[in-house]
Image (cartoon, rainbow, N blue to C red):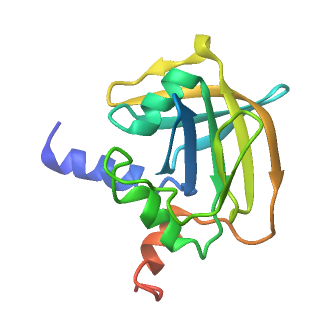
């Protein structure tokens, strides 16, 4: 594949739309969360979602250990949460410090300030090692809507991350 062909493929992939979420997990007395753009519903009966998580991340380690995670759907004004959960490692910082959250029925952290949330249990037989990332398919065990608003997307965050719409 030529450099131009690879550039064209990367440009085409960049056109795929993504939401931005905080995925949280807990295991062994530790909690962590991370910004995630790969969350999607995969079945409706039973309700199942899938997430893609980098295998080097602490959140991945906690999900592998506990088999549970939360998805907090961020509002389009949650730039600070995207940064707090996305620009540093949970191995060196407590990302939940100063962030209101509650512990859900599965024991995972859920952000108080989110549009909606899901609590999920991994279906181990549907786990897929994708190389640098893992795909977790999980049954939704709890969830709810916390407030109304527009969900954050990766495109919107990128266009407004400096406080105004970028050209």
In the foreground, 27 or 21: 27
Q: Residue furthest top?
A: 125
Residue beneath the point at 69% across and 62% down: 114
Write the residue at 33% across / 25% down: 131
Q: Position of residue 28 (x, y in %)?
A: 51, 28
Please determine whether, in this image, residue 85 is positioned above or below residue 91. below
Q: Position of residue 129 (x, y in %)?
A: 42, 20
Q: How many marks?
A: 0
Quadrant in which the N terminus appears:
top left
| Residue at image location 46% in from the left, 56% down from the top | 95
Instruction: Specify whether 131 is left or right of 127.
Output: left
Left or right: 140 with respect to 39?
A: right
Quarter of the image where one finds residue 103: top right
Residue 19 on image: x %, y %: 58, 56
Q: Residue furthest front?
A: 29
| Relative height, residue 142 to residue 93 (above, below) | above
Q: Residue at x 65, y 68 (%)?
A: 75
Quick one: quadrant of the C terminus?
A: bottom left
Q: Residue furthest bottom?
A: 164
Occupied quadrant, residue 91 = top left
Q: Position of residue 35 (x, y in %)?
A: 48, 53
Q: Nearer the viewer, residue 60 or 41?
A: 60
Q: Is residue 114 left or right of residue 52?
A: right
Residue 76 in the figure: left or right of residue 86: right
């Amino acid at each position: 594949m030529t450099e131009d062909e690879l550039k064209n493929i990367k440009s085409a992939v960049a056109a795929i739309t993504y939401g931005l979420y905080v995925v949280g997990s807990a295991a062994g007395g530790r909690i962590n969360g991370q910004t995630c753009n790969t969350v999607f519903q995969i079945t409706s009966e039973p309700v199942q979602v899938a997430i893609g998580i980098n295998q080097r991340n602490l959140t991945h380690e906690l999900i592998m250990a506990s088999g549970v995670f939360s998805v907090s759907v961020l509002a389009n004004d949650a730039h600070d949460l995207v940064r707090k959960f996305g620009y540093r490692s949970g191995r060196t910082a407590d990302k939940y410090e100063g962030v209101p959250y509650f512990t859900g029925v599965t024991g995972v952290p859920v952000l108080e300030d989110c549009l909606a949330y899901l609590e999920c249990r991994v279906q181990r037989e549907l786990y897929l090692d994708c190389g640098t990332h893992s795909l977790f398919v999980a049954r939704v065990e709890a969830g709810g809507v916390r407030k109304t608003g527009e969900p954050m997307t990766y495109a919107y965050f990128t266009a407004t991350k400096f406080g105004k719409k970028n050209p």
